[in-house]
Image: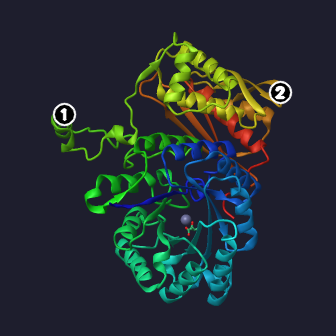
Amino acid sequence: MADKLIIFDTTLRDGEQSPGASMTKDEKIRIAKQLERLRVDVIEAGFAAASPGDFESIKAIAGIIKESTVCSLSRANDRDIARAAEALAPAARKRIHTFIATSPLHMEKKLRMSPEQVLEQAKQAVRFARNFTDDVEFSPEDGSRSDIDFLCRVLETVINEGATTINFADTVGYGVPELYGNMLKTLRERIPNSDKAVWSVHCHNDLGMAVANSLAGIMIGGARQIECTINGLGERAGNTSLEEVVMAVKTRKDYFRLDVGIDTTQIVPASKLVSQITGFAVQPNKAVVGANAFAHASGIHQDGVLKARDTYEIMRAEDVGWTANKIVLGKLSGRNAFKQRLEELGIELESETEVNAAFARFKELADRKAEIFDEDIIALVADEQHSHDNEHYRFVSLRQHSETGERPTAKVVFTMGGKELACEGQGNGPVDATVNAIESEAKSGSELLLFSVNAITTGTQSQGEVTMRLSKAGRIVNGVGADPDIVVASAKAYLSALNKLHSKVDKLNPQL
Ligand code: KIV
Ligand code: ZN
């Protein structure tokens, strides 16, 4: 029987550390549910001690997720570990992941600690964490730039204290596959108790080698856990991307000879959800989840695929969750058909009131758009959920005028704290005029960092999905809005971002 490869997803922790990718509790819960549908083995839900918002999100996820293990990161100190344990208390399966830097550079310049102090702190941390759970992971931060003799001493010590997973971190993406894999192999060979722990890889993508390094860590180093994120989201150039390692191991099982428990048909829905929530678009030529990943433009390729699909396709689009744009519902579809489609798409709404609200929006949309696709339903429900997130501002209506040679104007009606306001603005373009109109009343004083528009489906009748990223006093938030009219979608996205800025629960910055 092939060994199992444990898939540890850290989209909600390391992924969230991408500047601009911070998520609200509700958004994290939606992603966690999708990760469970994807059947990831471990969900790193956050860093409990980082902020009250992170703590609450982990606690909520721990109470909801039943199949996957829920994990919290913590520095190697009692306060962080106790906070992680408290947040994880409701979990059916829980893991505490504690870390401390072991490279000379980090110990001297960042921690200002001697190697002996680091060794002692790592030992005490794992010992303390074992009071709360038998499932304790230890990471030597900047492991790949650490002295191998020192690393052997630290890792042998923490395994003796009961660490059950050792995560060899390539924190700054410095590794190259052969060297990284061999260093891990040496560690496992030299550490006498190495067989008492599962070995894990955690690679960053600064040189574009995170996936290659992770796979070398498996094949050369003998790792049996991979840490990764959806769409490769993560600090700087990101982390190892889940979809790429999973599909590599599955497609080349002849070589890797490992089993993964992932339901691959949930990969594309997970990718879309994460992209939609964070506002980080997926590049079209991204492996597996990019819009062009299965598109054949050249005549020779098209001809080949029509004759025998495997001439140019090594994976099947439907196996990773791509579905053809299907018209699923229309103006005459009833509530039951709508509800059934929600179920088929794996969308869970919490109450009948929410189903009714989503159905009302669906009817509104169907009046304006003849063909409703799955993507429309997903966007519509997301839009509905965004507007429920701390709803201080709500879009009501918009009237906009633009004509060649004239400065565009917009009149927007929205509610602020329940009070309806009508405002007007001018701008360089219709979206600028709309935002200026809203700002004339909201006076948020925020800075717009990103404005992006995406067609949800094909054709000019497609809904536009707009992301607006705002920053204010060190906080960065994303707002998303969808509508067949992209100016309306922009107004909704702007108001959704203002709602998030208005909410006090989120942390200032995902990084500590
Ligand atoms: O990159 C890193 O070193 C980390 C650790 C906390 C595992 O994210
Ligand atoms: Zn990391």
Please state if 271 lies on the left or on the right of 476 as rendered: left
Please state if 44 lies on the left or on the right of 177 as rendered: right
Q: Quadrant of residue 408?
A: top right
Screen quadrant of the C terminus: bottom right
Amino acid under disc 2: Gly
For the residues marked 2 and 1, what is the alpha-carbon distance in whole angstroms? 57 Å
Q: Please, what secondary structure does the residue beneath circle 1 have?
A: helix
Residue 48 higher or lower than 456, as above or below: below
Which residue is located at x 61 percent, y 79 percent? 161
Q: Nearer the viewer, mark 2 or mark 1?
A: 1
Residue 63 x, y percent position in the rendering: 68, 48
Ligand 1: image quarter: bottom right
Q: Please, what secondary structure does the residue beneath circle 2 have?
A: loop
Which residue corresponds to mark 1? Answer: 306
Could you classify mark 2 by the number of other residues whose Cα lies within 10 Å: few (under 14), some (14-19), or many (20 or more)? Answer: few
Q: Quadrant of residue 189?
A: bottom left
